[in-house]
Image (cartoon, rainbow, N blue to C red):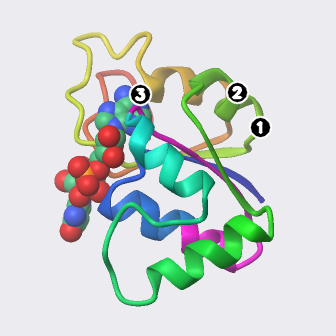
Amino acid sequence: MRIAIFGMGYVGAVSAACLARDGHEVVGVDIDPHKLDLLRRGHSPIVEEGIQELTAQVVQAGRLTVTDDVSEAIRRSEVSFIILREKPRPSGRGGIAHRAQHDHAALVASSCVGLGCKA
Ligand SMILES: NC(=O)c1ccc[n+]([C@@H]2O[C@H](COP(=O)([O-])OP(=O)(O)OC[C@H]3O[C@@H](n4cnc5c(N)ncnc54)[C@H](O)[C@@H]3O)[C@@H](O)[C@H]2O)c1
């Protein structure tokens, strides 16, 4: 399955690496250019047992890629996982959850999402 994960933090980076290990094609999205640069080079931005080796493997295999482009990530995936700490916009409109829900059959959130989003 083609999966987008928004937020390459403690939960997102581990989820991305594990889903890619299990054969899924994962695109990770973050607003932090340092985290994206680390991941592009096959390094995990977080410290967790085994995560460095796993991240290196799945990046090298081409199953985990990253971008800061929300539209590209949504276009390239069938399902989005939103794993942020961001506060939702009051209406939900224009936020990641709202945009992803528009294009996907499935949206999974471990985050705050705006009113009206069916996560
Ligand atoms: N860490 C835990 O043990 C844990 C456990 C259960 C649930 N959660 C929940 O999971 C969610 C994520 O937690 P975490 O610990 O992984 O957070 P984190 O702060 O480690 O990671 C969040 C990431 O999201 C990125 N980000 C922020 N705004 C963004 C945006 N607009 N687009 C793309 N990326 C963006 C940040 O740069 C950061 O890398 C939270 O809702 C938290 O409550 C966390």
What residue is drawn where x is 37% and y is 36%? 32
Q: Please name the amino acid that badge 3 sits on.
A: Cys
Instruction: Tell me whether the residue at label 1 lies in contact with that at label 2, contact meaning CB atoms closer than 8 angstroms.
Output: yes
Image coordinates for residue 88, horizontal then vertical, percent: 25, 24
Instruction: Tell me whether the residue at label 3 lies in contact with that at label 1, contact meaning CB atoms closer than 8 angstroms.
Output: no
Q: Point out the frontmost of discs 3 and 1.
A: 1
103 within the magenta span: no
Q: Residue furthest bottom?
A: 49
Q: Secondary structure at mark 2?
A: helix
Image coordinates for residue 67, horizontal then vertical, percent: 61, 36
Q: CA distance from mark 1 to mark 2?
A: 6 Å
Image coordinates for residue 102, horizontal then vertical, percent: 61, 22
Q: Residues within 10 Å of mark 3 (few under 14, many from 20)?
A: some
Q: Secondary structure at mark 1?
A: loop
Residue 115 visible in the current orientation: yes
Q: CA distance from mark 3 to mark 1?
A: 21 Å
Q: Secondary structure at mark 3?
A: loop
Instruction: State the image quarter where residue 103 is shown.
Output: top right
Q: How many marks?
A: 3
> Where is mark 1, residue-wise?
76
Which residue is at the front of the view, 73 or 32?
Answer: 32
What residue is drawn where x is 55% and y is 84%? 53
Residue 61 vertical position relative to residue 108 in the rendered view, above or below: below
> Where is mark 2, residue-wise?
72
29 within the magenta span: yes
Which residue is at the front of the view, 44 or 19?
Answer: 44
The C terminus lies in quadrant: top left
Q: Residues within 10 Å of mark 2 (few under 14, many from 20)?
A: few
Residues in magenta?
A: 17-31
Residue 78 vertical position relative to residue 75 in the rendered view, above or below: below
Q: CA distance from mark 3 to mark 2?
A: 20 Å
| Circle nearer the N terminus (3, 1) | 1
